[in-house]
Amino acid sequence: MLDGLRFLAIVPARSGSKGIAGKNMRKLAGVSLIGHAARCLAALPWLDRRIISTDSVTYAEEAAAYGLDAPFLRPSELSDDASNVIDAMRQAVSACEAVDAVTYDRILIVEPTSPLRQPQDIERAARELAADPSCQSVMCVSPAGTHCHPYKMLRLDDGYLDHYDPAAAAIVSRQQLEALYIRNGACYGMTREALFAHPSTLTKRTRAVLIDRPMANIDDPLDLEWAEFLLARAASKPTGEATCPE
C-alpha cells in the first residue's frame, strides 16, 4: 500500500504486434521487454499486486520468470489490433479483484515498450496519483523537441508546401514556441473510478510526470536499436543509474 491506498500494477502485453513480431519478447541487454517492466515493478515493495495482462501463454510464462503474476489470460476479443487498452485494463482489474477478493484503489499501467523507465518514474506517478484527491489520472511524458512542434509542420496544398497551422507564419524563432510534451509510455496511472468511467488515460484531471532524459518507445526495429544504444551508454557511465535492479 501507498498512503493507505491499494495499488495494482498491470503490464499490458498482447501477442499480436504487427510492427515487430513477438515484440514484447524481444531482448535488450539480454532481458525481454516484459522482463524490463517486471524488474522495475519488483523494485517497488509498496505495490499490492503486479500482474501481466496477456493473451499468450508464452508471455505469461516469461512474466512469471521475472516475478509477475498471471492469474488469467486476456480474452481474444480484447487482444486484436482494434482492441482498446482501456477495455483490456478494465477486464484485468475486474478479473484480478475477483481472484484476490479485494478492491484496488489505484491502477498503474506499465507498458513493456518503454524499457528505459526507472522504478522512481513509476513511484513518482503513484505518489502524484495518491497525493491529489481530485486527480483522476497521471501520465509520464517527455518534452517534445521543437522539430516536431505543430507550428513546424508543413502540408501539401495543391502540390505546394504550406503551414499546417496558419498561426505558424507569425513564429520567427523557436523561443516563441509553447512547451509541449509527448507520452513516453513509462507509466500511466488512474483511479479505479476514472478507469471505469473514462475512455482514455487522458481525462480532464490528468497530471504530468515529466521525465527529462532520453527515452525509447518501441514501435519498430529502429526503436530497438535506439534503446540498445541508450542502455549501453548508461551502462558505460560509472555514475550512471541502472535502468532497473539486476
Image (tube, rainbow, N blue to C red):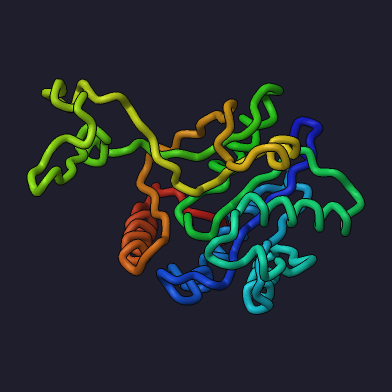
Residue appearing at x 71%, y 23% in the figure: 133
Q: Position of residue 171 (x, y in %)?
A: 15, 23
Q: Which residue appears farthest toward the right when viewing the image?
A: 101
User: Which of the 4 image quadrants contains residue 70?
Assistant: bottom right
Considering depth in this image, is 145 or 85 the residue closer to the camera? 85
Image quarter (top left, top right, bottom left or bottom right) of the N terminus: top right
Could you tell whether 1 is left or right of 138 in the image? right
Q: Position of residue 83 (x, y in %)?
A: 59, 60
Residue 66, percent across and down? 65, 67
Q: Is residue 142 above or below residue 93?
A: above
Viewer-proximal residue among 108 and 155:
155
Tell me where residue 219 appears, x and y as whole percent.
40, 62
For residue 29, side relative to residue 104 (left or right)? left
Instruction: Look at the picture and state if 246 lies above or below 151.
Output: below
Q: Who's the residue at 57% across and 66% down the image?
A: 35
| 238 in relation to 203, above or below | below
Q: Is residue 174 left or right of residue 82?
A: left
In front of the other: 228 or 187? 187
Q: How many marks?
A: 0
Task: Kindly identify the residue that appears in the image at 39 percent across and 47 percent down.
Answer: 239
| Residue 66 seen from this side | yes
Q: Which corner quadrant holds the C terminus?
A: bottom right
Q: Residue at x 53, y 65 (%)?
A: 81
Q: Is residue 42 visible?
A: no
Extreme bottom residue here? 58
